[in-house]
Image: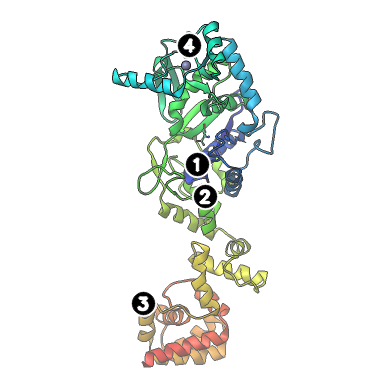
Amino acid sequence: MEPAVVTRFAPSPTGALHPGNARTALFSFLLARARGGRFLLRIEDTDRERGSEQHVATQLAELEWLGIGWDAGPGRDDGRGPYRQSERGALYARLFAQLEREGQAYPCYCTPAELEVARRTQLAAGQPPRYPGICRALDAAARAAREREGRTPALRFAVPGAETLRFDDRVRGPQAIEAATLGDFLVRRADGGAVFFFCNAVDDALMGVTDVLRGDDHLANTPRQLLLLRALGLPTPRYGHLPLLLDASGAPQSKRRGSVTLSQLRERGYLPAALANYLLRLGHHGAPDGWLDLAEMPRHFDAGRLGRAPAHFDAAQLDHWQREAVLRLDGAAAARWLAAELPADWDGERRASVAALLKGNVLLPGDARDWLAVLGGALPPLAPDAAQAISEAGPAFFDAALAGYAETGGDLAALADVLKRSTGRKGKALYMPLRCALTGRHDGPELAALLAAIPQSLVRDRLAGAARLGRG
Ligand code: GLU
Ligand code: ZN
């Protein structure tokens, strides 16, 4: 039997999440769900300077909003935690000791200045700069001498000699790199802190992660991580490196460049399911064209169909899915979504019926404002095509409409019958000028529902106004 799949998302809390991060999280989540596996959340907060508690809280909220739930993670331990790297120092220390004891890592006393000299010498000789192995050969006496000088060592991994490191990336295909090109790399800094890719690799192993999907900015870390895991006798996950998500300008999404964040999309009123539908198709081929609920997505996710080409974040595509998502809201859900725009004194029934009426014409909640004015305020300025339809119908039509409305009230079918008889108009020639007079626009929600929802005095004012407009 295939072992159970365990995936994870491992954000560094150095900023808010971008759609690119969300895509990585979603794909990892779906990969686990597709195979009946588990999805973990790990906070990679070893960078004390750049990380913050505020960002941790925001990132957790953003994931929850998106509907990506974790089986284990911060505050949800399963015995393999803690799930914050800042709380795992003792585990790392044990592994450093193991590496050192087995001669697979050694203390490095080099100062930044000494390393800089070595780097320049190599560059001048036309060689790629890498650690030249100065401290690898130090014997116990030489080490003791440096300790006496008060130098605190870093810890360097002793990269084995000539060897081609190979792994099969599930997105990028077979990879090969000569171990000798890596140079002995740091695993623990002189200040005692573990380096990022050490914690990242050993945590995956200790947490039982079988499948890693992550941004391809981490592809270059992978050979070193494979060496480390082998040296420690730990299992290696299967890696897949996703191409970066680019902004419309073609630059990679980044916190520093001010790319749009999940929080901003949420504040603007984008629905999480719209974003999930958009992200599912971004660099992942073969999902059905139509809408999928999050619960259906695992069945349609296949890590074998991940593309290698960088994808662009495309606001128009997101809007397409947003429209689909909004249309799927029932009245109550649409009312919650529009809550900030709806008058506070409306009862639940009115809120739900108006929200249901407007949702086909509203992409983001702010778009509802003009329609709410149509339903109970001052009409927005007449659109040119609406003004034209009104003048084409002429004042007699609106006089007849006023008279008909006095008889029929908010019943559009009855009003249309009366108008048909009195004006000889029918179909579009009848409905369009009515719509334009009542809403100031050529298009919008269903006219019968609008007519029923607009207060009678406003209907009369607007029909009378249209009649006046025709008289000039
Ligand atoms: N903490 C890393 C990041 O935020 C994740 C690395 C990984 O997924 O392996 O980029
Ligand atoms: Zn050294």
Find disc 2 in the rendering and name its residue.
Answer: 262
Q: Which amino acid, mark 1?
A: Asn
Disc 1: CA contacts within 10 A as few (<14), some (14-19) or many (>=20): many
Disc 2: CA contacts within 10 A as few (<14), some (14-19) or many (>=20): many
Q: Relative to 412, does residue 261 appear above or below in the rendering?
A: above
Secondary structure state at the residue bearing disc 1 = helix
Q: Which amino acid, mark 3?
A: Asp
Mark 1 vs mark 4: which is more N-terminal?
Answer: 1
State the colouring used for the structure image: rainbow
Percent of width and height locating residue 24? 50, 39
Find disc 4 in the rendering and name its residue.
Answer: 136
Asked if the residue under mark 2 is in contact with the one under mark 3, i.e. CB atoms within 8 Å, the reply is no
**Mark 2 C-beta closer than 8 Å to ligand 1:** no
Q: Spatial distance from mark 3 to mark 2, Cα to Cα?
A: 38 Å
Secondary structure state at the residue bearing disc 4 = loop
* Mark closer to the observer (1, 4): 4
Secondary structure state at the residue bearing disc 3 = helix
Percent of width and height locating residue 168? 45, 23
Q: Nearer the viewer, residue 295 or 258?
A: 258
Asked if the residue under mark 2 is in contact with the one under mark 1, i.e. CB atoms within 8 Å, the reply is yes
Find disc 1 in the rendering and name its residue.
Answer: 21
Disc 3: CA contacts within 10 A as few (<14), some (14-19) or many (>=20): few
Mark 3 vs mark 2: which is more N-terminal?
Answer: 2
Mark 1 vs mark 2: which is more N-terminal?
Answer: 1
Find disc 3 in the rendering and name its residue.
Answer: 385
Residue pictured at 53% horizontal, 59% vertical: 326
Asked if the residue under mark 4 is in contact with the one under mark 1, i.e. CB atoms within 8 Å, the reply is no
Secondary structure state at the residue bearing disc 2 = helix
